[in-house]
Amino acid sequence: MFKYLQREPTEEKMGIPDPEAIKQFQLLMEEVDEPLKNTFENVHQGYPDETFVRFLKARDWNVGKAHKMVRLLSFLNKCNKFVIYAMLVDCLQWRIDSEIDNILAKPIIPTDLYRAVRDSQLLGLSGYSKEGLPVIAVGVGLSTYDKASVNYYVQSHIQMNEYRDRVVLPSATKKYGKYIGTCVKILDMTGLRLSALNHIKLLTVISTIDDLNYPEKTDTYYIVNAPYIFSACWKVVKPLLQERTRKKIQVLQGCGKDELLKIMDYSSLPHFCRKQGSGSSRNSENGHSSNCFSLDHAYHQEIYNFVKQQAMRMECVAPIKQGSFHVNFPDPNPDDAEIAKTIEAEFHKHGNHNGLTKSLSGLRLNGS
């Protein structure tokens, strides 16, 4: 469950963006190859400096870490070995290798398969905060990830990231007349149980992809409907998180409705926050259209139609093929592995509470 939280740099390393650091980043980026520059345009969406700041924040404002030895890129490329890219260059190279620029033209088909993904990977956009930040809802406890292969879930997650960055955030920036580059996330823990450990490997992959390629995209995490098992794990996991991450996380009472209404209108509340005990149920008092996880929700219909339209344009060049969109999975950060082991231990320790009796025999956090 804590895999939904991205690692952040320490508080003392933050502060006002250093113009000199940004300038260094700009000069370094001028040295990269043209394909990297082209995919960078899809990343920054007209705001390169703000993008530099995101990557610098993610590496404690250290340009060396954020863009390692760029002057050696040409030599390293020729060697084809021990290629050392820094975070941004790694990100851009990953985008090229995995064809991320085209992922919004790669629909998950047939429709029944995509619906199954949406029903088992509970993620959606419920509205916007009063400051204009998109409100992303995540059904942590009731996501089962058991209706499709890992590649489909990763593809779906990246598509939603890309749609957020290329469509949702630029539209919000235009609507509110100011740069908006982050969102708020509401994590619903309804239904969280021992079986969630079965998903840790997949969630580690998704979390690592976000850490490396979509850093600093979440302003605040709100955790709602937290059961006992979450509270028990949170006590031991919280100290393992970096200070800045901890400060971004707010565990709210119950469904969090009263607190969330301070930063957003009622219409932007996810369905599971509108009344006590509502949870991430696939049914709601207004039907599927008010369930932001459902494929029938306006947001998912918007994405679905957008991807189909983009695919039709590309189909003029090559026919659409069924099958998942494969991307390169990065190695998990050692800190994530430590947190995963801690979560496993706590689930095992408290698993018998609330009737959680499923055996952990044979379950592994790492490996196949």
Image (cartoon, rainbow, N blue to C red):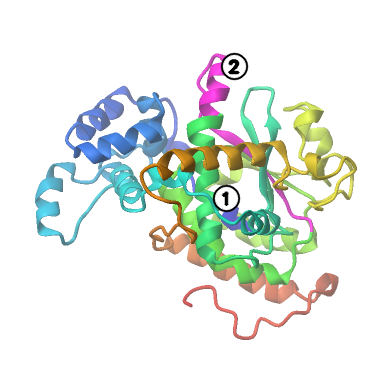
In the displayed structure, 45 sits above or below 257; it is above
**Local SS, label 2:** helix
**Which span is picked out in magenta?**
169-190
Residue sitting at 46 percent across and 55 percent down? 208
In the displayed structure, 88 sits above or below 225; it is above
Residue 345 appears in which quarter of the rendering? Answer: bottom right
Horizontal side, residue 320 vs residue 280: left or right: left
Q: Earlier in the sequence, mark 1 or mark 2?
A: 1
Total label count? Answer: 2
Disc number for residue 176: 2
- Observer-nearest of 112 and 325: 112
- Observer-nearest of 143 and 312: 312
Residue sitting at 60 percent across and 80 percent down? 363
Amino acid marked by disc 1: Leu
Horizontal side, residue 181 vs residue 134: left or right: left
**Number of the front mark, 1 or 2:** 2
- Observer-nearest of 323 and 275: 323
Disc number for residue 5: 1
The answer to whether residue 10 shows anywhere in this view is no
Residue sitting at 82 percent across and 51 percent down? 279
**Local SS, label 1:** loop
Crowding near pointer 1: few (<14 within 10 Å), some, many (20+)?
Answer: many
Residue sitting at 34 percent across and 26 percent down? 18
Q: Position of residue 250 (x, y in %)?
A: 69, 42
Which residue of the protein is positioned furthest toward the top in this rendering?
177
